């Protein structure tokens, strides 16, 4: 039984560090020269499919993922440190969709699969890079390239191991709340559950997903009650 699990997140890759303009200043060196190092590269934003996850619930509480910027270059030909990547860990079967919520960018179908969805900016060149036979003392350096910021949708089509099927007010939500970590809405009127609620139950070392399905009545496939459009 398939259900749709969606989360919208904002990501930003790191900007590259700027190159340095620097010259050797040593007491016993007769001819100094440019020694400005390059800037470090900005971090990437990566999405990785991992084992042990069943839902995208973690992304309901954290929606911003920013990689680190690269450090600026320094004198003495020192290159700036690259920025750290940031990795979003998602369940297998997660689709990465563009901001429009319709265009599929990537589909993660295997454990361990990794996708770079926002590359970090390259670091800028220091003035040492621009030294040539005709320009022995360049006083120019590049700024690092900016990172990429965008919004994406994570779309997971879950396959529940167990579905609680029954009439409205049959106690399905109560059962889900007692056996899993879910907190479904419970009330004494029909159709309290409007969308499937998911919970992860654990028995010893095994985990499985239970779905609390909205109450189905005769004629639901024709739109009676709340219909059956919530089923994928």
Image (tube, rainbow, N blue to C red):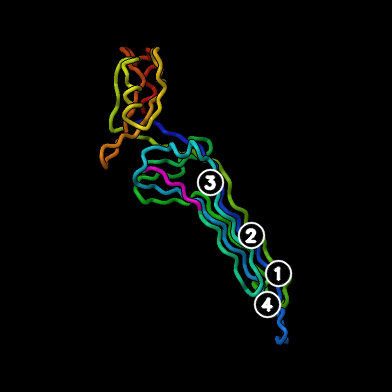
| Magenta residue span | 86-91
Mark nearer the viewer, 2 or 3: 3
Identify the residue position indicated by label 4 in the image. Answer: 132
Q: Nearer the viewer, mark 2 or mark 4?
A: 2
Q: CA distance from mark 4 to mark 3?
A: 41 Å
In terms of sequence position, does the residue under pointer 2 or pointer 4 come before the other? Answer: 4
Query: Can you give x and y, in whole percent of width and height, for residue 220 in the image?
Result: 34, 15
Decide: is 13 above or below 80.
above
Q: Toward which corner of the image does residue 178 lie, by quadrant? A: top left
Q: Secondary structure at mark 4?
A: loop
- Residue 157 vs 191, above or below: the answer is below
Q: Is residue 87 magenta?
A: yes
Residue occupied by mark 2: 144
| Residue 143 in view of the camera | yes
74 magenta-colored: no
Query: Gap in Å between the C-alphas at discs 3 and 1?
Result: 32 Å
Res. 65 mark: 3
Q: Position of residue 109 (x, y in %)?
A: 35, 45
Which sits in the foreground, 72 or 186?
186
Question: Spatial distance from mark 2 to mark 4, Cα to Cα?
Answer: 22 Å
Q: Is residue 134 visible?
A: no
State how far apart marks 4 and 1 are (Cα): 15 Å
What is the crowding at mark 1: few (fewer than 14 residues within 10 Å), some, or many (at least 20)? Answer: many
In the rendered structure, which disc, 2 or 3, sits on the residue that comes first in sequence? 3
User: Looking at the image, which is closer to me, 75 or 185?
Assistant: 185
């Amino acid at each position: 039984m398939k259900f749709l699990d969606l989360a919208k997140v904002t990501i930003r890759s790191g900007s590259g560090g700027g190159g340095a303009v620097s010259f050797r200043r040593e007491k016993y060196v007769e001819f100094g020269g440019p020694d400005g190092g390059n800037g470090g590269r900005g971090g990437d934003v990566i999405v990785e499919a991992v084992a042990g996850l069943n839902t995208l619930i973690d992304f309901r509480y954290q929606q911003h993922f920013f990689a680190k910027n690269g450090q600026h270059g320094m004198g003495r030909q020192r290159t700036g440190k690259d920025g750290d990547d940031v990795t979003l860990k998602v369940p297998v079967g997660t689709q990465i969709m563009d901001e429009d919520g319709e265009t599929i960018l990537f589909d993660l179908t295997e454990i361990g699969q990794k996708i770079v969805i926002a590359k970090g900016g390259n670091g800028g060149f220091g003035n040492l890079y621009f030294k040539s036979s005709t320009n022995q003392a360049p006083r120019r350096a590049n700024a690092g390239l900016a990172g990429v910021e965008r919004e994406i949708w994570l779309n997971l089509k879950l396959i529940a191991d167990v579905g609680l099927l029954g009439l409205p007010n049959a106690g399905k939500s109560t059962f889900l709340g007692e056996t899993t970590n879910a907190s479904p809405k419970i009330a004494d009127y029909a159709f309290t559950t409007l969308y499937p609620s998911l919970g992860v139950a654990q028995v010893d070392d095994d985990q499985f997903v239970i779905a609390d399905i909205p109450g189905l009545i005769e004629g639901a496939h024709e739109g009676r009650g709340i219909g059956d459009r919530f089923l994928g």
